[in-house]
Amino acid sequence: MHSANSRVTLNITEANETLETAKSLLTESDYLAVASYLVILGIIAILANSFVIFVLLKGEVSYYRIHKKLLLNIAIADLMLSLIAFPFFASSSFANRWLFSDIGCTFAGFWIFLLAQNDMNTHAAIAVYRYIIICQPSYEYYLKRKNASLYILGTVWGHTLLFTGLPLVGWSRYQQEAFGTSCTIAWDDNRPAELAYNIVIIIACYCVHVVIFIFCYYKIINEFSSAKRCLARLREEVITDRETLRLELMLKYHKVMTYRKVTVASLAMVAAFMIAWTPYAILGAYVMYDTNVPAWVLLTPTMFAKSSTVLSPLSCALFSGSFRTAAKQLFCKNEEVLDEVQNGSVLRPLASNHSSPEFVQKEVRVTLYKGELTINDIFVGNFDNMEL
């Protein structure tokens, strides 16, 4: 009991010292700028993530169920972070000090670490998922099992809770940051236990994920390059011998290129998230060995990291054609535009007569068009534009 009281007293003393240091380095104008930034960012994040959640739930987004659930997991986490954590930090910034006691600091620090790490884990799960369905289709069977999405989300949240919950049970702790209006783990504590925890989370919660991202998307990009060469061979066969068109080439091309735009959107979301959080991770690792870092230097990456709550939905909207199509279907009232969105571009026959090849092979109907090729009315490729 005496040890626990001493620890609490130590935490309060350290927090007061940190706050006094911050006050000597940040002005009232600085705090006002931070508070205004958090208010604006929070409003945009709430609106953007609410919109993404609405479209994913109500729109006809052509993602597999697992992918859609993982995107929902990210959007809901970012929404919860904006609704709960941002008000703590914004109100404290307006007051130029932390307003919510040590318990509030622990909760706020845990909440933002929990939801940010959930985003990181979910992006890693999406990368592995896309790697399997594109590069290792023989294992796709496991993703189609009844409870596959539950197992994946359970793994994501299990890893998240394991590493973010450890400070709640005594291994390290959450404390105020140097500028005194936000909370995080004790990066600057050089005691052996706290230092060991910091090293563990940098490896298990950041470095491992970076390796996963690099490996998965490198393999996927290589597969896309292979698909481009496949398309060149397919086009040559269509031109030289329409009657012996090799369906396996078409199916391989369709298998890979159908996922191309979705993967580009996923990669864009990962890039945006990593751009937002990497400066903070690097600075956190640096602070473990040098605690004499000015408060404004700590402030900049901390505030930039919170922008991930806006960058993720923005990346989804800008780079996902399927998401934009679903949004148009929900909100567009112009019937002509809606028909264009639903039906796609008009397919033009190769010739005006009835000599265009239309045959059946292995119970698959193949129709050749001047610009586009379909299998069972599924778009395969555009032969007027070879740039992929």
Image: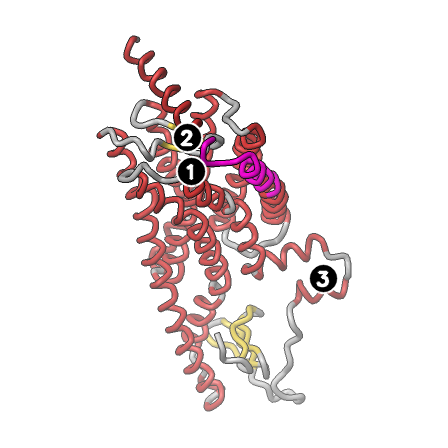
Q: Which residue is mark 2?
A: 21
Point out residue 182 in the picture as x, y percentages from the top left corner: 47, 32
Give the amino acid type for the residue marked by disc 2 in the picture. Answer: Thr
Tell whether label 1 touches label 2 (CB within 8 Å).
yes
Classed neighbour count for the residue bearing mark 2: other residues with Cα under 10 Å, few (<14), some (14–19), many (≥20) = some
- Read off the magenta span: 23-40
Point out residue 85 in the picture as x, y percentages from the top left corner: 52, 33
Element type at mark 2: helix
Q: Residue at x 43, y 25 (%)?
A: 106
Give the amino acid type for the residue marked by disc 3 in the picture. Answer: Leu
Q: CA distance from mark 2 to mark 1?
A: 8 Å
Q: Is residue 376 left or right of residue 233?
A: right
Q: Earlier in the sequence, mark 3 or mark 2?
A: 2
Q: Is residue 23 left or right of residue 321?
A: left
Q: CA distance from mark 3 to mark 2?
A: 59 Å
Q: Residue at x 48, y 74 (%)?
A: 388
Q: Which residue is mark 3?
A: 338
| Color style of the picture | secondary structure
Q: Which residue is mark 1?
A: 295
Give the amino acid type for the residue marked by disc 1 in the picture. Answer: Ala
